[in-house]
Amino acid sequence: MSDEDKKTPEGPKLPDKNQGKEIAKAVLQVGGGIPGIGGFLSAAASAWSEQEQENVNKIFQQWIHMLQEELQEKGQTILEIMARIDMQEEKTKERVESDEYQSLMKKSFRNWPNINSESKRKKIRNLLTNAAVSDLTSDDVVSLFIDWLNMYSDFHFEVIGEIYRKAPISRGEIWDNLGRKKAAENSAEADLYKMLIRDLSVGSVIRQQREVDAYGNFIQKRRPPSRKSSGPKPMKSAFDYEEKYELTGLGQQFVHYAMTEITPRIEFQNNKAA
């Protein structure tokens, strides 16, 4: 590689302070479809002082840099997907070129601002890679998994992973296994954990363990005989060790698609600008 090739590309140059109105007019054209933006920018172009324009230029620079980073992440994700699938296989080629798969790609990248960690980016990569080569579930379910990656935090996914590895497992055991510090029942940490478990339960990702018959039908729990209470019972702990949890069928498929990595077929060096 020549010295010329090794040069880091220059970022966009800031316009000089005399170009304030031209910038505002350009943004006005780009943002013409946003209600109200026209009147605001027209007024701003005439009203901004020299100091204000310098500040606006800095903000524009930050936004452009943010968009460049987002585009770089998307490009890296696409390259990593293509390195993991066999485009010489006709079935895979047809799948990747299909409208259904392209729709999943567009949905994933349209919601990219919610992919706010490297862990989530890899899950999107895994999801789209497995969706290209596997037909274990429908595209409707894969689309739901994309929604989950937008809705849930990395902490949610840590809990899902621990339940997958150790089910049936209690909330207290999950908390301990993840190395979380002991917390009081009235603490913000306990409230957050209860909310997280509720999110995953309502979202049909996890459920309390249930018995099933030979046909896979759930058997209703037998309630223990009621006993006369000698006083009010304490509420169930956020870190309860009795009730056990497991993944639902959807939860298990999510782990297969989003949390299982396919080994790259092609190794490449991702050269990021310093």
Image (cartoon, grey):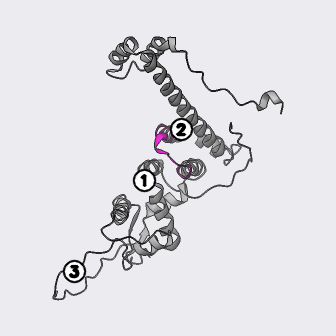
Q: Is residue 173 left or right of residue 221?
A: right
Q: Residue at x 61, y 50 (%)?
A: 133
Q: Secondary structure at mark 2?
A: helix
Mark 2, other Cα within 10 Å: few <14 / some 14–19 / many ≥20: few
Q: Which of these two is toward me, 148 or 21?
A: 21
Q: Nearer the viewer, mark 2 or mark 1?
A: 1
- Residue type, mark 3 in image: Lys
Q: Is residue 61 above or below residue 257?
A: above
Q: CA distance from mark 3 to mark 1?
A: 33 Å
Which of the labelled discs sits on residue 233, or is there none?
Answer: 3
Residue depicted at 33% across the width and 66% down the height? 187
Asked if marks 3 and 1 touch (Cβ < 8 Å), the reply is no
Give 62 or 67, whichever is nearer the viewer: 62
Label 1 secondary element: loop
Q: Within 10 angstroms of label 1, few (less than 14), some, or many (20 or more) residues?
A: some
User: Compared to 105, does 223 lie above or below?
Assistant: below
Q: Where is residue 243 shown, x and y percent of the image? A: 36, 77
Please tell me which residue lies in front, 175 or 186.
Answer: 186
What secondary structure prevails in the magenta region? helix
Q: Which residues are magenta?
A: 106-120
**In this figure, which residue is indicated by the disc labeled 2?**
102
Please state which of the two labelled residues, at mark 3 or mark 1, is closer to the viewer. Answer: 3
Q: Position of residue 36 (x, y in %)?
A: 32, 21
Circles 3 and 2 in contact, beta carbons < 8 Å: no
* Sequence-first disc among 2 and 1: 2
Q: Amino acid at mark 2?
A: Gln
Earlier sequence position, callout 3 versus callout 2: 2
Mark nearer the N terminus (3 vs 1): 1
Image location of residue 80, percent across then percent down: 65, 45
Q: Quadrant of the N terminus?
A: top right
Image disc number at residue 152: 1
